[in-house]
Image: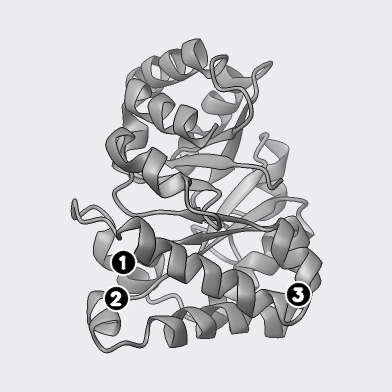
């Protein structure tokens, strides 16, 4: 049976006071989560504090982004080795906000994915379609293209040490959520596409769902056969709500 992973993406939110309170709440309830893995991805400046607060617990820490280069004249970027040094286990790459707001191409996302693996981090590769792309019936074309860029650079074996998060862009922060059937269909497509190159890697791959997941809908989403947890946005900023989602992943 595949592992389950629930990762909280805190995005551009938080202060030292608020993250300490949030981590205190998550730590108090994390023991009730028996089998699902838990991760939190704070803004980069708070990674050392969160890693310190998570020390000795089962809560892993991830970054929200990673430079595609390992060192050099890349002002404002953070290398994988730096993230590793401060206790990160995961690195989100290709989040829809990075793609749409900051113009990150499929090729750049693939390079960030590769950089995470070079640093010994587990990349969480985000893929997903815009509303107009779903309405045009090209969801699988878009998601397939995003996966193909990583496959071309890194090969199928790279997915043995990676996570994929399907995020329908139209459902992120909008309150809209793909139905369990809609989400499952894309998750199944992802697994089937990767299985063409290596069925064993595809079968073991954790594929998360991201897009307005909350305690009220988590159990139904996670009951689908190819949904292995969630990449959680707004709900991850509330300890009780986040923990309820984690328990649903059990």
Quarter location, residue 241: top left
Q: Is residue 129 above or below residue 97?
A: below
**Residue 118 position within the rendered picture, expressed as x and y whole percent measured from the top left:** 78, 60
Q: Determine which residue is flagged by label 3.
A: 156
Q: Are marks 1 and 3 in contact (CB under 8 Å)?
A: no
Q: Determine which residue is flagged by label 1.
A: 169
Q: Is residue 54 above or below residue 165?
A: above
Residue 21 is left or right of residue 250, and the answer is left
Quarter location, residue 139: bottom left
**Residue 104 position within the rendered picture, expressed as x and y whole percent measured from the top left:** 44, 75
Labels 2 and 3: the sequence-earlier one: 2
Secondary structure found at label 2: loop
Q: Residues within 10 Å of mark 1 (few under 14, many from 20)?
A: many
Labels 1 and 3: the sequence-earlier one: 3
Q: Are marks 1 and 2 in contact (CB under 8 Å)?
A: yes
Q: Are marks 2 and 3 in contact (CB under 8 Å)?
A: no
Real-space Cα distance between discs 1 and 3? 25 Å
Q: Residue at x 61, y 84 (%)?
A: 148
Q: Which mark is residue 188?
A: none
Real-space Cα distance between discs 1 and 2? 5 Å
Quarter of the C terminus within the rendering: top right
Most distant residue in the top direction = 28
**Residue 31 position within the rendered picture, expressed as x and y whole percent measured from the top left:** 57, 14
Q: Determine which residue is flagged by label 2.
A: 130
């Amino acid at each position: 049976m595949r592992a389950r992973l629930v990762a909280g993406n805190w995005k551009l939110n938080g202060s030292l006071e608020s993250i300490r309170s949030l981590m205190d709440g998550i730590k108090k309830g994390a023991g009730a989560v028996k089998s699902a893995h838990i991760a939190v991805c704070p803004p980069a400046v708070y990674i050392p504090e969160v890693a310190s607060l998570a020390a000795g617990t089962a809560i892993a820490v991830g970054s929200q982004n990673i430079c595609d280069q390992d060192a050099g004249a890349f002002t404002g970027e953070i290398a994988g080795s730096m993230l590793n040094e401060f206790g990160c286990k995961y690195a989100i790459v290709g989040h829809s906000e990075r793609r749409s707001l900051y113009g990150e191409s499929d090729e750049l996302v693939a390079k960030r994915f590769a950089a995470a693996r070079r640093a010994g981090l587990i990349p969480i590769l985000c893929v997903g379609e815009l509303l107009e792309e779903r309405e045009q019936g090209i969801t699988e074309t878009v998601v397939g293209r995003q996966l193909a860029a990583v496959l071309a650079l890194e090969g199928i074996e790279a997915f043995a040490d990676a996570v994929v998060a399907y995020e329908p862009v139209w459902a992120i922060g909008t309150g809209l959520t793909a139905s369990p059937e809609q989400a499952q269909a894309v998750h199944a497509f992802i697994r089937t596409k990767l299985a063409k190159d290596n069925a064993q890697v595809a079968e073991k791959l954790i594929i998360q769902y991201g897009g307005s997941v909350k305690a009220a809908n988590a159990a139904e989403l996670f009951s689908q056969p190819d949904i292995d947890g969630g990449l959680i946005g707004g709900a991850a900023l509330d300890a009780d709500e986040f923990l309820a989602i984690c328990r649903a992943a059990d």
